[in-house]
Amino acid sequence: MVRNLSALIAFIVLCELAGVIGSIFTIRAIPNWYFVLNKPWFTPPNWLFGPIWLILYFLMGLSLYLVFESKRNRAKEKPALWAFGVQLILNVLWSVLFFGMHYLFYGFVEIVLLWISIAVTTLLFFRVSKAAAYLLLPYILWVTIAASLNYYVFLLNA
């Protein structure tokens, strides 16, 4: 049950906006720079990334809403919300480093930090709302795949 529709919409928009900011760097790089990179055999087709991220940002916003609205334990909620903010900033930063600046190695280092921050956020969310934590599992799975891609793109193009 949604108790605060405007908060739910705001959190989803916030997360989707992070995706829009990241896509500013991504869209310009794909047809030129990214296209000519050597990529591993398991690289998904380019058309798949957009819809997957759209869904993941939606799930992130929903997850954030569940923690924000839990009102069970503010002592547990506050660190979870801060962790979410950190991982969202790191999410955008990866696009800047990898696609915007073409830093394959630093992109990989940063995506490892992003993965860790998502794991911490998920654990903190679990303490507040199990449903919120479960909604982040597809996100960490996809970032695991993205980190593997980043690693192999770095190796194949070093």
Image: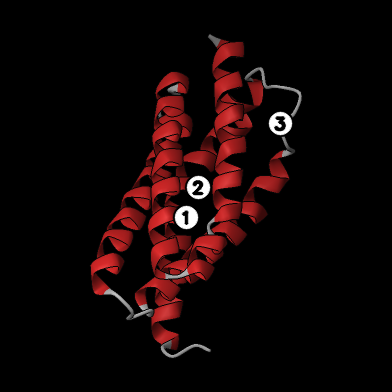
Residue 153: percent from left, percent from top: 59, 20
Q: Is the C-beta separation of discs 2 and 3 under 8 Å?
A: no
Q: Where 29 falls versus 5 (above or below)?
A: above
Q: Nearer the viewer, residue 33 or 14?
A: 14
Q: Residue at x 55, y 41 (%)?
A: 143
Q: Residue at x 52, y 40 (%)?
A: 26
Dot in front, 2 or 3: 3
Residues under labels 1 and 2: Cα distance? 5 Å
Q: Which of pointers 2 and 3 lies earlier in the amino acid sequence? A: 2
Q: Name the secondary structure under disc 2.
A: helix
Residues under labels 3 and 1: Cα distance? 22 Å
Q: Label 2: how many residues lie within 10 Å, few (<14), some (14-19) or many (20+)?
A: some
Residue 34: percent from left, percent from top: 59, 27
Give the residue pinned by disc 2. 23
Q: Is the C-beta separation of discs 1 and 2 under 8 Å?
A: yes
The answer, for residue 100, to whether it is visible in the render is: no
Q: Name the secondary structure under disc 3.
A: loop
Q: Name the secondary structure under disc 1.
A: helix
Q: Label 3: how many residues lie within 10 Å, few (<14), some (14-19) or many (20+)?
A: few
**Amino acid type at mark 2:** Ser
Mark number displayed over residue 43: 3
Q: How is the image coloured?
A: secondary structure
Q: Where 21 falls versus 94 (above or below)?
A: below
Give the residue pinned by disc 1. 20
Residue 81: percent from left, percent from top: 31, 62
